[in-house]
Image (cartoon, helix red, strand yellow):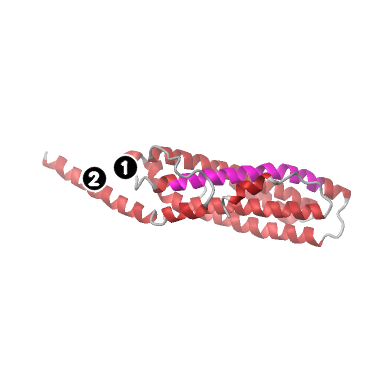
Amino acid sequence: MERRKFLGAVTAFAGATFSAQALGAFGGLDKIGGALGGGNGGAGAASWKDIAKSFGEAKASFAATAQEQALIAADIADALDLKSEAEALRGEAGNLAEKGDAMGSGDLKAVAENSASTQALIEAKLQESEALTDEQKAALGKAAADYMPTLISGVSVAMAVKDTVQNASGLGAPGFRDGRAAISAAKDIPVLGPKIIKFLIDSAKTGKSLMSLMKTKGVATPDDSEMDSQLAGFA
């Protein structure tokens, strides 16, 4: 009986210690959720297990969407004769496919930096192109048509992640009974959640800007008005 009491005390102490650490990690989560905009915060998952599941699914959706965007951006780079940049983007897409929902903060930072620098090169190249060939216009038009749905779906993923961040902020710290996935999610959500959202929203805004630039060069692009209402919640 004494041994049971001792073990119970140790477990209670460990749980309290973890809770303090986890709550510390979530210290700014309410502020993060409120500042992100968009989404349907308050829909609420029932438990940390639900939160962990939804966050894992959102990370997988993010990786798939970012991978698809990288491949399309590679096609755009190819059309503008940016061969090395196109190759780098395809390598990035391969890394995204390999990581999937196991992507960490460091992986996301590298992807964001590579994407931003390559997109800047693409826009600069397109801006300085005085006249595109018919072949280039056709290739860019096809890429634009493929690109738009990924930008829209990316904003939807951002909304889902934003909801998860807000819902997690109302649950407090997970306990050991919630499982390792929940404990891992509690640590990852405050760090990865906002970064995933920023990446996807930045991608959508950059993609929209790129579409507008393509139009000025005589490239046929799809209607992007649907994105306006989606992005309004993240202004």
Q: Position of residue 10 (x, y in %)?
A: 21, 47
Which image quarter holds the N terminus? top left
Q: Position of residue 115 (x, y in %)?
A: 64, 55
Q: CA distance from mark 1 to mark 2?
A: 9 Å
Q: According to the image, label 2 marks what residue? A: 11
Residue placed furthest toward the left: 2
The disc, 1 or 2, on the residue closer to the chain's N-terminal end is 2
From the viewer's side, name the closer residue of 17 and 169.
Answer: 169
Say whether residue 164 is magenta: yes
In the picture shown, does residue 167 fall above or below 105? above
Disc 1 secondary structure class: helix
In the picture shown, does residue 88 fall above or below 146? below
Q: Are marks 1 and 2 in contact (CB under 8 Å)?
A: yes
Disc 2 secondary structure class: helix
Does 89 sit left or right of 14 as displayed? Answer: right
Which numbered dot is residue 81? none
Q: Position of residue 77 (x, y in %)?
A: 75, 53
* Residue located at (72% from left, 60% from top): 121
The answer to whether residue 94 is visible is no
In the picture shown, does residue 112 fall above or below 1? below
* Residue located at (32% from left, 43% from top): 175
The crowd level at tag 2 (other Cα within 10 Å; few <14, some 14-19, many 20+) is: few
* Residue located at (26% from left, 50% from top): 16
Amino acid at the residue labelled 1: Phe
Q: According to the image, label 1 marks what residue? A: 176
The answer to whether residue 202 is visible is yes
Q: Which residues are magenta?
A: 139-166
The crowd level at tag 1 (other Cα within 10 Å; few <14, some 14-19, many 20+) is: some
From the viewer's side, name the closer residue of 81 and 59.
Answer: 59
Say whether residue 212 is magenta: no
